[in-house]
Every structure is written in C-alpha cells, then in structure tokens.
Amino acid sequence: MALRSEQPGPPAVAWFEGGLEVRSVPGPAPKLDAEPEAVLEAAGVPVPGRRLNATQGTLPAGPVARYEFQQGTSRTLVYLLPREERFVLVLYTAAERDYGPGSARVERSLSTLKPTR
C-alpha cells in the first residue's frame, strides 16, 4: 500500500493506496472502552456505518481497541492506539469482497508496529 498523500495536521493524516488511512490526533486519548463512535468523533472521522464489533487487545505498540463497521457493501476496520499526548487511528476501508484479504494484511502489518515516541 503505497503512500498517496499526507497532511501535516493537526491531526496529521497519511492516506495510502487500497483504502488505508493513518491519523495522529493530538490531545488526550479516548479510553479503550469508550464507544467507538465517540473515538471517531474525537478524531474528526465520520462514523463509517453500523458497528459490527468492538474489542480490546494488545500489539507490540501497546494496548489497542479494534472496531469494525459496515455501510452498504463496504467495511471499515479501525484501530485505536493511545499514546501519551495523542492517539493514533488506523482505518482501512474496502468493498466487502476485498475486505478480508486487505484487513488481514493491515493487521499483520500492525503486529510489527512500534511507535518511536
């Protein structure tokens, strides 16, 4: 997934080919058990349909919340990664037929994510 464009922010946003977006939002991070809709609102992201699930877990980068949404024939995967003075959202949106392989690729990549600060 090659970088398509970026915006310095705030929030800093990077858009990649294939429907991947990464946002670094300054300010206090939402709690991992916050409602996903509130997390998206805090990041300035419209809710991408109806929520399918919301779970918590841990990556090498730390504790995360994971959400999935569906709107029509599209699905969106969202990861919340709280940091000290900001939070990072990773969003992946794709058509239902492409969502499984694409989201698996995103999640494999996240398993190696290690923030530098």
Image (cartoon, helix red, strand yellow):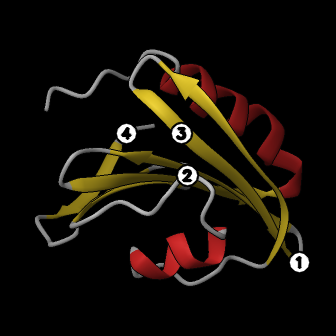
**Which x, y percent locates residue 105?**
63, 27
Q: Amino acid at mark 2?
A: Leu
**Which x, y percent locates residue 17?**
46, 49
Q: Is residue 64 visible?
A: yes
Question: Quick one: 65 or 22, which is closer to the camera?
Answer: 65
In this rendering, position of residue 99 left or right of residue 87: right
Label 4: element kind: loop
* CB contact under 8 Å: marks 3 and 2: yes
Residue 64, disc? 3
Closer to viewer: mark 4 or mark 2: 2
Q: Amino acid at mark 4?
A: Ala
Residue 72, disc? 1
For mark 3, does the 10 Å Cα neighbourhood hold few (<14), some (14 to 19), or many (20 or more) residues?
A: many
Q: CA distance from mark 3 to mark 2?
A: 7 Å
Give the image quarter of residue 104: top right
Above or below 16: residue 62:
above
Q: Amino acid at mark 3?
A: Val
**Which x, y percent locates residue 42?**
41, 78
Q: Report the residue at 64% width, 31% height from top.
A: 57
Q: CA distance from mark 4 to mark 2?
A: 29 Å
For mark 2, does the 10 Å Cα neighbourhood hold few (<14), some (14 to 19), or many (20 or more) residues?
A: some
Label 3: element kind: strand
Above or below 4: residue 11:
below
Of marks 3 and 2, which one's residue comes earlier in the chain? 2
